[in-house]
């Protein structure tokens, strides 16, 4: 079974921390476990950005930030659901790019039916990834890396390696970019979906099973949980959220391309980790992912304000992921991620 964690003794394979670093690390881990770390980071970032640009705290600027963050939140949820099972996907952004191209082409012929069609296709592609991962016992990293190439190639082929401007049928998704009393409808939908998922994770057995699989898949299987079914279902759900992110991007940009969502891969992973989800699985939640996504979205805005070239921003996201994992990982647990 992949994705499982071997539990080791508290002192086995661990490196003692120095007395000076132990208290700080312990406090950081406590904040991480309570889900307060992203809240504090968000407050600090808001303070810094507003000090640099006082107009940032105005209502239109804040609403613009929420609107821009919607696709990132959806891709982060797609990633976070996989991470909660003790796995990772490198294909969610590539799938979103492919779904955007499909949507741009299908809106002209299917109209409003193009949206559910793309969501179903995205869920099926996620399902295929899950079935292959579970059936072959290959690490999810390898399987999704392979599908990243598949999705990129398909998107390039279908788009003709060019951006597709959506004209006919655009009205079927344009409403997502509208605002209700100044609040972006896209972010209201994201809040609704986040709330529903939080209830599912908290109240329904599926949420407990996802965390059980992520924390210790072998123990979950011995307790009667059909772990393979849970994993495959989560990959399908992740695919659907990736497709929904594509719908939101097409609504915002009125266009789609083979690489439209690719730049959100690393930020979506960073959002999950910064939000307080353990990379080894079993710890975290949808609310934390939302907060982590807002932190990363605000960071992107802050970097643009201070004039940091977008070409250098992935370096920072990569460093954030490494530092966040290093500071919060529980080294008493197995760290293998399948």
Image (cartoon, rainbow, N blue to C red):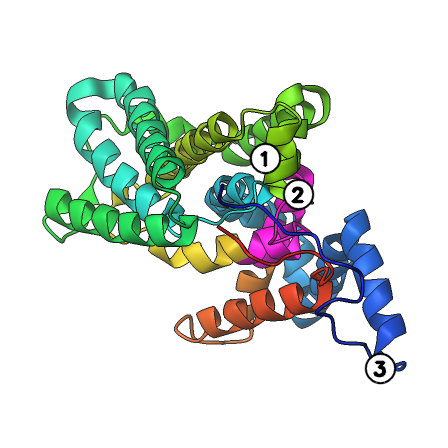
Quadrant position of residue 177: top left
Q: Could you give the CA–CA distance between mark 2 and mark 3, rounded to whole angstroms?
A: 28 Å
The image's mark for residue 80 is none
| Of 8 and 161, the residue lying toward us | 8
Total numbered circles? 3
**Residue 204 in the image: above or below residue 237:** above
Magenta run includes residue 287? yes
Which is nearer the N-term, disc 2 or disc 1?
Answer: 1
x, y percent for residue 20: 88, 82
Of discs 1 and 3, which sits in the foreground? 3
CA neighbours of label 1 inside 10 A, class few (<14), some (14 to 19), many (20+): some
Task: Give the residue pinned by disc 3.
Answer: 18
Which is nearer the N-term, disc 1 or disc 3?
Answer: 3
Horizontal side, residue 202 vs residue 21: left or right: left
Quadrant position of residue 21: bottom right
**Residue 63 in the image: above or below residue 273:** above
Q: Which residues are magenta?
A: 270-297
CA neighbours of label 2 inside 10 A, class few (<14), some (14 to 19), many (20+): many
Quadrant position of residue 312: bottom left
Task: Give the residue pinned by disc 1.
Answer: 183
Q: Could you give the CA–CA distance between mark 1 and mark 3, rounded to whole angstroms?
A: 49 Å
x, y percent for residue 119: 35, 27
Q: Under tag 1, what secondary structure? A: strand
Q: Under tag 2, what secondary structure? A: helix
Magenta stretch, main secondary structure class: helix
Do tag 1 and tag 3 residues touch (Cβ < 8 Å)?
no
Residue 69 in view here: yes
Residue 297 in view here: no
Q: Under tag 3, what secondary structure? A: loop
The image's mark for residue 215 is 2
At x 59% / y 30%, what residue is drawn? 221
Horizontal side, residue 141 vs residue 46: left or right: left
């Amino acid at each position: 079974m992949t994705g499982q964690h071997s539990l080791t003794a508290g002192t086995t394979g661990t490196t003692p921390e120095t007395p000076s670093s132990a208290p700080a690390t312990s406090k950081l881990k406590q904040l991480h476990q309570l889900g307060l770390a992203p809240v504090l980071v968000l407050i600090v970032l808001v303070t810094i950005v507003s000090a640099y640009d006082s107009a940032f705290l105005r209502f239109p600027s804040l609403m613009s930030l929420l609107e821009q963050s919607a696709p990132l939140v959806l891709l982060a949820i797609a990633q976070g659901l996989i991470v909660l099972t003790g796995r990772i996907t490198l294909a969610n952004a590539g799938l979103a790019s492919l779904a955007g191209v499909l949507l741009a082409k299908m809106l002209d012929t299917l109209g409003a039916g193009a949206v559910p069609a793309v969501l179903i296709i995205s869920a099926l592609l996620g399902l295929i990834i899950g079935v292959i991962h579970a059936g072959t016992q290959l690490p999810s990293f390898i399987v999704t890396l392979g599908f990243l190439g598949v999705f990129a190639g398909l998107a390039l082929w279908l788009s003709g390696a060019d951006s597709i401007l959506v004209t006919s049928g655009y009205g079927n998704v344009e409403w997502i970019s509208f605002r209700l009393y100044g609040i972006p409808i896209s972010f209201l939908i994201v809040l609704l979906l986040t709330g529903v998922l939080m209830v599912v994770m908290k109240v329904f057995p599926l949420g407990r099973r996802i965390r059980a699989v992520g924390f210790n898949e072998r123990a979950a299987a011995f307790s009667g949980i059909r772990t393979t079914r849970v994993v495959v279902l989560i990959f399908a759900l992740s695919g659907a959220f990736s497709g929904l992110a594509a719908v939101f991007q097409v609504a915002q940009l009125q266009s789609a391309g083979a690489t439209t969502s690719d730049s959100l891969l690393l930020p979506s992973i960073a959002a999950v980790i910064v939000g307080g989800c353990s990379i080894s699985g079993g710890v975290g939640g949808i609310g934390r992912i939302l907060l982590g996504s807002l932190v990363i979205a605000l960071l992107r805005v802050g970097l643009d304000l201070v004039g940091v070239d977008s070409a250098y921003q992935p370096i920072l996201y990569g460093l954030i992921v490494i530092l966040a994992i290093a500071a919060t990982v529980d080294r008493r647990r197995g760290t293998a991620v399948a």
